[in-house]
Image (cartoon, helix red, strand yellow):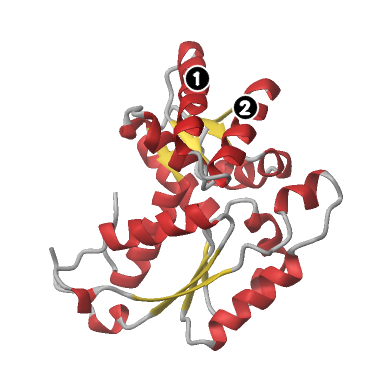
Amino acid sequence: MKKMDESKVEKVLGVLGGMGPAASARFLELMAEKVPVKRDQEHPKIIMLSDPQIPDRGEAILKNGKDPSEVIKRDLLKIVEWGADLLAVPCNTAHIFIEKFLDQLPVPLISIVKSTVKMASIRSVNGVWFLSTKATKKSGIYEKHAQKYNLPLYRVSEEISGKAQRVIKIVKANDKEKAAFFMKEIVTELWHEKDLPILAACTELPLAYEASGLPMEKMVSSLDALASACIEELYGEKQG
């Protein structure tokens, strides 16, 4: 391991969590697991604001629900006021709204969408099965970034998309065992059609996949991708 640049380690990472809480907790766990350190003092300083009361992102897009943009923006600016030099949001659907005011943020934000597409393009040149919330699927945000990396995204049927949405809701309800059962059912059906890695483009989906016993090397986790991108920015260490 190369010697760490102390000036980079001093950067403070600000995380807007709570969308949902379990996924945010797993993101912090991944940060702790993946950083190239040997002792507590070498870990990055992280400020997290967990705000589960942010209006539902999916309902805003699919059902004309309350737009969460102002709350997300307010929370991110608050984290910057607290001392963050770099921002991350472990929620894919939230980035649909963040892109509207990204240029108004005073510090850089690492995009979970861009990070995930980049990781997927390295791991599978033949493409990936795209699983996400229905709102993320409808927005086309992943397709926009995938085109830049020449990554083929294989869209699932409406039936499977509905099953994935169900898995997400079950994870949010804290029943990972049940979510894992349905996740395995979805993935088995997709692999029967085409043997490609699963791109888990909702931060609840990696939690269900991890609990299912499916081979980890056949999933591209948006949580893992975001954590890796944050670590690379903080330490200058390229992550796999």
Residue 99 position, x and y percent, is 67, 62
Residue lying farthest to the right in this orientation: 64
Q: Amino acid at mark 1?
A: Glu
Residue 177 position, x and y percent, is 44, 33
Q: Which mark is residue 77?
A: none
State left or right for residue 204 relative to residue 12: right
> Image point 29% across, 49% down: which residue?
240
In the depicted view, which residue is nearer to us: 202 or 109?
202
**Looking at the image, residue 53 lies above or below residue 217:** below
Q: Which residue has dot 2 on it?
A: 163
The reply to whether the C-beta atoms of the residues labelled 2 and 1 are less than 8 Å apart is yes
State left or right for residue 154 relative to residue 162: left
Residue 224 position, x and y percent, is 39, 50
Query: Helix, strand or loop at disc 2?
Result: helix
How would you rate the neighbour count of disc 1 (Cα within 10 Å): few for under 14, some for 14-19, many for 20 or more? some
Residue 184 position, x and y percent, is 45, 24
In the depicted view, which residue is nearer to us: 171 or 36?
171
> Image point 52% across, 74% down: which residue?
108
State left or right for residue 151 relative to residue 97: left
How would you rate the neighbour count of disc 2 (Cα within 10 Å): few for under 14, some for 14-19, many for 20 or more? some
Which of the marked residues, 2 or 1, is nearer the chain's N terminus? Answer: 2
What separation in Å lies between label 2 and label 1 (alpha carbons)? 9 Å
State left or right for residue 80 relative to residue 210: right
Where residue 228 sits, quadrant-wise, is bottom left
In the depicted view, which residue is nearer to us: 90 or 19?
19
Q: Amino acid at mark 2?
A: Lys
> Image point 34% across, 71% down: which residue?
234
Q: Which residue has dot 1 on it?
A: 185
Residue lying farthest to the top in this orientation: 192
Query: Helix, strand or loop at disc 1?
Result: helix
